[in-house]
Image (cartoon, rainbow, N blue to C red):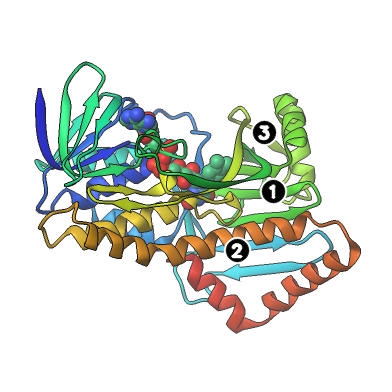
Amino acid sequence: MVTDFDIVILGGGLNGAALACALANGPHAVAVVEPHPPAAPTEAWDSRIYAYSPGNVGWMKALGGWDESVRAQAVFQMRIHGDAGGRLSFDALDAGLPELAWIAENGRLQASLWRAFQASVNVTTIAARAEAVTWNPDGHHRLHLAGGDSLRARLLVAADGAQSWLRGQAGIGIRSEDYRHVGVVANFETEKPHRGTAFQWFRPDGVLAWLPLPGKHISMVWSTPPEHAAELQALDGDQLARKVAAAGGHGLGPLRRITPAAGFPLVRRRADEWVRPGLVLLGDAAHTVHPLAGQGVNLGFRDSRLLAEMLASGGDPGEIGRLAGYAARRMEDVASMQFTTGGLKKLFARRDGLTQFMRNAGMSLAGGFDPINQALTRHAVL
Ligand SMILES: Cc1cc2nc3c(=O)[nH]c(=O)nc-3n(C[C@H](O)[C@H](O)[C@H](O)COP(=O)(O)OP(=O)(O)OC[C@H]3O[C@@H](n4cnc5c(N)ncnc54)[C@H](O)[C@@H]3O)c2cc1C
């Protein structure tokens, strides 16, 4: 059976789901194809915890996609430490903002976004894996699903993640650079309250971040070379807790690990093309960045925000002129984030004494100079 839609979103992860919410009240008939719909959340903590910018949280709340089931912690301060005394601090109060970011679990947010778009008559969800595509020059592409059904769409959206199957089917190349870092993540209970503070340490062995979670809990992301990541992942719960507490100067007292450690190889990617007639790539399918600035999914949300805004006026959603305009407007945000995160990672990977002195002095200087400090803060909250 062939079913026609205006827009078919392949992948219902955070980016595909957020786009579906943003299109739910628009003029188009939308389908979301996802073989693994989110499970109902339990009390257990998800290991995938991200920082979300206030701009994106406000957008999702307005769409009804961020409800009270999302266990979220506001970040009021960020304390960043260099590897030789350099310091940077960001404070919501100083910048005249209610908060700098929100921290929340992937699973609960995804389930909340799904509830919101499933309440709309404009959005159909299809629990299936896509297996083939028939490309048409006029853009009415056809997606063949496991099980034999197919969908015809005026716009196909690749929101199927960093290894994007649809990007591969389109033969779109990708430029990638292995950061030679693995992001080791785990959640911990703390002895002392974190008071909404996020901590980050640029260390000789990588970048360690503690993100505050509701109650006396934190999420750790330790981005570190693969050999060290393997050592961290081989530790038992108590050993890892002691190691992570010591690496953070025991600032929140002893830690207790509450989720097993998991590791994610970190790779910068940028697809060679983001749009073609009747096709758009967004989120991790189009670009990935180092997580040290907590911006990966935030870039994807900004993709969805702009795309939904540009499609809201109706007409053919697959028309290349409008899609090319979208891609051009998103390029700068993504390029500058890839440049900044890649540059910082490289700067702190260098071991020579002069570079170490300069980077730490630079941090303290920028941190002590209000206009720079406030400009950095304002960019991060978009
Ligand atoms: C260690 C680490 C820490 C991070 N921290 C942050 C942070 O603090 N802040 C931040 O903004 N970002 C962070 N990120 C980045 C963030 O995790 C990603 O940007 C985000 O999860 C990508 O979402 P997505 O929806 O694009 O892709 P995904 O979450 O990968 O979703 C893709 C979906 O597509 C589906 N799919 C795949 N193939 C098919 C197919 N053939 N047919 C149908 N469906 C298919 C999959 O089932 C999946 O549900 C971090 C990443 C890492 C690794």
State the residue position of label 2: 340
Q: Nearer the viewer, residue 223 or 52?
A: 223
Q: Amino acid at mark 1?
A: Leu
Task: For the residues labelled 1 and 2, say whether their Cβ atoms are less than 8 Å apart.
Answer: no
Tag of residue 54:
none
- Say which quarter of the image contains residue 358: bottom right
Q: Residue at x 32, y 36 (%)?
A: 11
Q: Quadrant of the C terminus?
A: bottom left
Q: Residues within 10 Å of mark 2 (few under 14, many from 20)?
A: some
Q: How many neighbours does mark 1 have within 10 angstroms: few (below 14), some (14-19), or many (20 or more)?
A: many
Mark in the foreground, 3 or 2: 2
- The answer as to whether callout 1 falls within 8 Å of ligand 1 is no
Specify the label residue 256 is tagged with.
3
Tag 2: amino acid: Thr
Q: Nearer the viewer, residue 266 or 95?
A: 266
Q: Is residue 236 above or below residue 165?
A: above
Please identify the quarter of the rendering in which residue 346 is found: bottom right
For this orientation, the residue located farthest to the top is 147
Are dots 3 and 2 in contact, CB under 8 Å? no
The residue tagged 1 is: 208
Relative horizontal placement of residue 362, taking residue 110 as reference (left or right): right
- Residue 16, given in percent of the width and then of the height, sits at 31, 43
Report, in whole angstroms, how far the alpha carbon at label 1 lies from the one at label 2: 17 Å
Disc 1 or disc 2, which is closer to the eye?
Answer: 2
Q: Quadrant of ligand 1?
A: top left
Q: Secondary structure at mark 3?
A: strand
